[in-house]
Image (cartoon, rainbow, N blue to C red):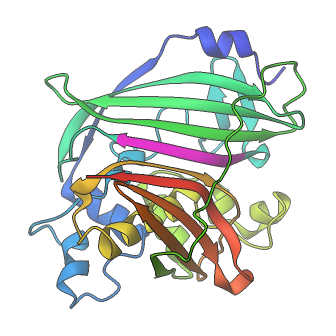
Amino acid sequence: MPIDVSAALSAAPTVREAAWTERDVILYHLGLGAGADSLDPAELGWVYEKNLRVLPTFAMVAGQGVSSGAPSRAGMNLPGIDIDLRKILHGGQSLTEHAPIPASGTATISSRVADVWDKGKAAVIVLEQSAGDADGNPLWTTGMQIWARGEGGFGGEPGPEVTAAMPDREADKVLVSTTDPRQALVYRLSGDLNPLHADPSFAQMAGFDRPILHGLASYGIVCKAVVDGVLDGDPSRIKSFSARFAGSLYPGETIETAVWREGDTLTLLATCPERDGQAVLTHATVEVL
């Protein structure tokens, strides 16, 4: 059986040491399309080591790219879980930042399977990751939801139902982010080497016309758009960011992010205008300082 729920949930956390440099941060930001206008001081702040800023979503790739237990080139291999890459999709992501991420640093990262939900035709594997600095101070906590198609129906709990309640008014802002046709090829250098994002034949076997952009790239692109367009370029103002991946994006397409602000909470809806407004990120909220 590809998923042994009891074995997955009872396994001890995997702990690893991670280290990153300014070069890693810059490469990650380039994978999100930062620095497209290299003469813009605001863009240069994401891709030049002088006064380098760090997006909180860099937590997704800090150290060795993806977290321990995230999809590898061969498949997802965790205690009790062995699933082919062609069956899995990144369903959702949450991030809580406890302290600003330094431009270079180290962390102890603990990863575990926090839950496995039965959605009938699919299973949802919830991977939780927590990171702390050398003194034990928390840096970030993340939650990754992985959809495993064809692995449901084992009689487990379906998981919580979350509704996407959008404000009944026009968005306060609409942020436009363009992507480059080569963007997935750059983003994958930060750690996620899934061939779905580079190999046309593999993408077609998985049901796509061509390689798609990583869900976490879209997640980071939207985070950068919010920091640039709403938070005056200050990434330290983001406390948390959660979203569901509602649709794929092909490199070269555009993300339009509608933003509604209510106090310290931003509600987001990211869509692709080239495909008649198809949703890219839904159930998206950002808590800000």
Residue shown at 14% from the left, 67% from the top: 49
Q: For residue 91: magenta?
A: yes
Residue shown at 42% from the left, 69% from the top: 32
Q: Which residues are magenta?
A: 89-96
Q: Main secondary structure of the magenta part?
A: strand
Quarter occupied by the N terminus: top right
Above or below, 211 against 6 in this view is: below
Q: On the image, which quarter does residue 155 sit in?
A: top right
Residue shown at 71% from the left, 37% from the top: 161
Residue shown at 69% from the left, 65% from the top: 248
Above or below, 174 against 88 in this view is: below
Q: On the image, which quarter does residue 81 sit in?
A: top right
Above or below, 273 against 206 in this view is: below
**Residue 176, position as x, y percentages in the image:** 48, 82
Q: For residue 236: magenta?
A: no
Above or below, 67 against 82 in this view is: below
